[in-house]
Amino acid sequence: MSNNVFGLDIGTRNVVGTVGYKNEDDQFVVIAQYNKEHETRAMLDGQIHDIGRVGRTIKKVKEALEEQTRETLSDVCIAAAGRVLKTVTTHIEYEYPEESVVTDEDIHTLDLLGVEKAQNILKENNDTQYKFYCVGYSVVKYYLNDEVFINLEAHKAMKIGEDIIATFLPEDVVDGLYSAVGQADLTVANMTLEPIAAINVAIPENFRLLNIALVDVGAGTSDISITRDGSIIAYGMIPHAGDELTEVIVQQYLVDFKTAESMKLASTTEDEVTYKDIMSISHTIPSKEIWDLVEPVVDRITGEIAQKIRELNGDKTVSACFVVGGGGKIHGFTEHLADHLELPYERVALRGEEVLGDVVFEQAEIKKDPLIVTPVGICLNYYDQKNNFIMVHFNGERLKLYDNNHLTVVDAALTAGFPNDALFPKRGTPINFTVNGAQRIARGEAGDSAVVTLNGEPANINTPLEPNCEITITPSSAGSDAVYTVGQLEEYRNSSMSFVVNGKRVTCPKFVEVNGILEPESYRIKEGDVIETRGYYTVAQVAEFLDVVIDENHEILVNNKTANMDTLVYENFSLDCVFDNDPLFEGEVIEEYNKDDVPEDKTEENTGADSENVVESETKSEPKSDNINTIDVALRVKVNGEDVILHGKSGYIFVDIFDFIDFDLKAGAGRAVVTTINGENAQYSQPLNQGDVLEIYWKEN
């Protein structure tokens, strides 16, 4: 497998391809380089306007390099430029749970957090219609436990941080580059920003302690970067460069753009320039004539560059300025820029051969000059990013992810800001309440999971990622909100109490108070409800449960003491009275009376304040369940000749059947209810089994 790196500088005027590798001496060895002009003005101001034409130019450069190297080129490094460049400088921190050794992955994660924060800042302040994509970033300063550090790796820290400058271009600029490269059958291995690529070559790290500006003057844009205190502190650009000089020559000498470009370049190296105009008439003019012609434009462009440098440098000039790129080679460019920056002429200079000392060219005909600084920098930038990042598409948006060799779909989702709760099924709103002082929660229904595809195939959030893959996620949905009634409470369904009424034992469910008010089993519990089961009935409520009418003209006795309709009747109390409608006690609520079940008459203990103690004791003895959710078991029974399926619980008792049939227990009108299971009288708490035959009806008087 080849170790060569293929870099493309896709400029407004030319496409420059470079292939090389780093040797053992850390030198970059260029084994092949090829330069081709666009056939037409397919790019303007660093942005692709004709993707097809630029793609064809890239393909010709690729084929020429393949012929030189005798190997197939498939992956390429590129750099982006454009007229709508945005930079954001911000600070990001990460605090460890405990003191830890900082790893390389920790640092890259911090970088990504910084880029993400910068992107959010840009979104908030974006006053254009463009959607921006991060094309590069530089760390200005690192912090270890709030102290400035040059390198964090391998140090122990409780907290790490960094000042980071992230650079963004409109997504359509980036999309154009990717499309053009794709048409040449190439895959982007790494993308950076043109000034980042240039500065990595032109201003070594040991120079960055100085306040220096680097200007990369291309055909359509002039890209600017600033260093200070050992770091790159700012990036910027202006949409003016060498093409504007060429256009002046076109108009003055009546030549096509390509001829004018040749005249401009010749004027930088020759004393005279020979050309043919559109009438095919040959002319020879002194180079100085071209210098004088373009001088006003040079002065205007360098003035704007100087203004941008001051803006990026805190409204002050820099200590020195280096110029790279073909556009900066025009006569007088550096002198005019020095004037505008108020610097001595020797402090503004072209950078070429002197900064390419660690670059070895195997092709003897290649001259080390400012024109090839950026193409070499694009290749070198790959080594900083090598295997650290991969590009993916997430729901149509391009993402740059730090590759830790175990990236999955969920990493892309989090980087893209996809909400966590949209990845997993969402339950409906729960209900929190208390039962006899114990906290309870009724959970909502679970929704549908997110639908994930990778390159069009079904996937999940743990599916591994691959470079340039297409990820789509349809958000998960929320289930229904929780609905829970008093009748579903275990304390209501399974807790009962019995009294002795006129010599017969009567079993009744315990009443339920919600927020101090008696509520029926159909009451829908609400958030924050306070529910208590009540350990007593009044005489009137006993009568209501039995669906009888008590003759109040006769004496009413509770535990053999004179009582009235409001007297409280506790567990195992006796009630003796006369009924107006002489009911028949049948079914599961009445059993034969056993006089041993009647408690001794202790009026002091069972009335007044002591009665409250009885209630508390009864309440404390009730079974409690903090887990409402149970395994759902379906049970099929036959009720009055028709099949009924019970569901929603792990087990069922007779009383559960009333949740699944339409039978009004309050519609007796003086009649007793008859309830049987398989022909035998049913008990309220009697377990139900698969296939049981139930009968429930009112006994006619």
Image (cartoon, grey):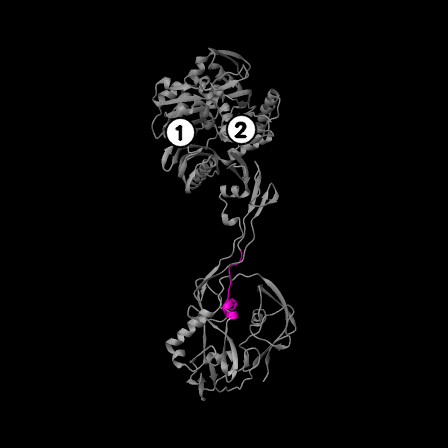
Q: Nearer the viewer, residue 103 or 621?
A: 621
Q: Which residues are magenta?
A: 479-494
The spot of residue 512 in percent (x, y) is 46, 71
Residue 250 has which mark? none
User: Extreme bottom residue here?
Assistant: 554
Q: Residue at x 46, y 13 (%)?
A: 287
The spot of residue 687 in percent (x, y) is 59, 70
In space, the residues marked 2 and 1 are separated at their CA atoms by 24 Å
Element assignment for label 1: strand
Q: Few, some or many C-alpha atoms within 10 Å of disc 1 (few <14, some 14-19, many ≥20)?
A: many
- Place residue 516 in its image quadrant: bottom left
Residue 231 has which mark? 1
Which corner quadrant holds the C terminus? bottom right
Whether residue 300 is visible here, answered yes or no, is no
Q: Is residue 480 magenta?
A: yes
Q: Is residue 527 magenta?
A: no
- Place residue 602 in its image quadrant: bottom left
Q: Which residue is mark 2?
A: 77
Q: Callout 1, which amino acid?
A: Ser
The spot of residue 279 in percent (x, y) is 55, 16
- Above or below, 90 relative to 333: below
The spot of residue 224 in percent (x, y) is 42, 27
Of badges 2 and 1, the one in the foreground is 1
